[in-house]
Amino acid sequence: MEKRYLFTPGPTPVPPQVLAAGAEPIVHHRGADFREIYASVLGRLKDVFRTEADVLLFTASGSGAMESAAANLCETGDRVAVVSHGSFGERWVDICEQHGLDVHAIRYEWGERPDPDEVGAAVRESGAGVVFCQQSDTSTGVVSDVRALKEAVGDATLVVDAVSSLGAVPLETDEWRIDVVVSGSQKALMAPPGLAMVSVPAHVLERTKPSRSFYFDWRRNKKAQDALDAAFTPAVSIIRSLDVALGLLLEDGLDAAFARHVRLGRAARAGAKAMGLELFSPDDDTAAVVTAIRAPDGVDADELLAHLRDRHGVTLAPGQQHLKGKIFRIGHIGWVDVFDIASALAAVELSLTELGADIERGTAVPAAFEAFESPVAA
Ligand SMILES: *Cc1c(COP(=O)(O)O)cnc(C)c1O
């Protein structure tokens, strides 16, 4: 009977009361029992998205909500722009291309942060009316300044993928005039995988095109949600769990969550550096979602991850696409505290030693705790 540890940036660990809520008896989705939960979760989502807009809730993974944006905002052949600086940016490109859109990709090296002025100029030049981007590209640990991106693209509709960042780093949907925000249940929202959300304000709904998707049709779903009568059978158990998780998040307050994520990021970076490892993700407080670390010379990152899992029951995340085998990632979103970071670092230290890497021992955990203690400016 081995204990397992999940330190990935999605899915993330889920608090016991959230899991317990999902084990409640199934209720019928068209009855009063569910309507109460549905109303509560939809209200809480607005609070977490910091918006007055409707937040449409789908039974899907985060990519479903991403795809819904392409299916509802654009007609075949429309020119769109994608800001891409990691594997999730490339996912926007793939989704848009599969929908027959004319994609203008504004690409950055993986690990670079997009420059808002450059993006603004590229969007104007492209003539795109809809722009897709990430707030956090989980593949690299880079968190973009989506507020500046919105200012830079002006009247173009900005669609922000905040699947790994909502609830972890500030996102003021209404105040920053972000048109559409997409998220998912299994990252910083501390719920099991299976739900996706998208905020769609009235001014955006007016601009929608006839949906190419039946299931993800924003108008159909909005109409149903307005009547608390879901368009299709939702994952009632996961919705129960999400409702409890959002309640926990809002009870502590989003600002407390944002400050905790900054401090967890500091702890992870300090620990990795103390071991003598090199960071791939930015070495600053913006990197509050996931810490990406280069494998030391002579060690394949995937081999390290397999060793961590098989020998020690610890799951970290691999590098994606061309970063596979080169980096590994420690997630610090959602229900994570500094002891989780300490455990992840200790396990990495032990495993690297077992794999024969030349690293500094005994320094990572103290460095992590020290960095965690440094105060965060409000
Ligand atoms: C996890 C994630 C998604 C969605 O992935 P799913 O597996 O479809 O839930 C999208 N964007 C980012 C940045 C993510 O981290």
Image (cartoon, helix red, strand yellow):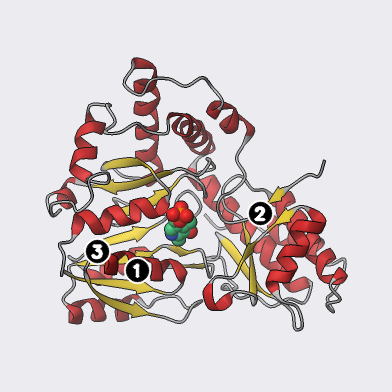
**Residue named by callout 2:** 7
Q: Do the numbered discs 1 and 2 sit on residues whose CB atoms are within 8 Å? A: no
The local crowd at label 1, few if under 14, some if 14 to 19, many if 20 or more residues have their Cα within 10 Å, is: some
Ligand 1 has an atom within 8 Å of the beta carbon of the residue at disc 2 = no
**CA–CA distance in space, label 1 to label 3:** 9 Å
Confirm if mark 1 falls within 8 A of ligand 1. Answer: no
Q: Does label 3 point to a residue whose CB lies under 8 Å from ligand 1?
A: no
Image coords of residue 135 (percent x, y): 41, 62
Query: From the image, which quarter does the N terminus lie in?
Result: top right
At 48% from the left and 48% from the top, the residue drawn is: 167
Q: Quick check: marks 3 and 2 in contact, CB under 8 Å?
A: no
* Quarter, ligand 1: bottom left
Q: Residue at x 65, y 75 (%)?
A: 325
In this view, the residue in front, 173 or 241, is 241
Q: Amino acid at mark 1?
A: Asp
Residue 220 lies, in percent from the top left, at 19, 39
What number of labels is visible? 3
Query: Where is residue 274 drawn, in percent x and y?
Result: 77, 72
**Residue at image coords 59%, 32%:** 19
Report which residue position mark 3 lands on. 99
Q: Residues within 10 Å of mark 3 (few under 14, many from 20)?
A: some
Label 1, on which residue? Answer: 94
- Please indicate whether residue 378 sits to the left or right of residue 85 in the image: right
From this view, report whether residue 225 is shown above or below residue 283.
above
- Could you say which is closer to the camera, residue 266 or residue 336? 336
Q: Quadrant of residue 304?
A: bottom right
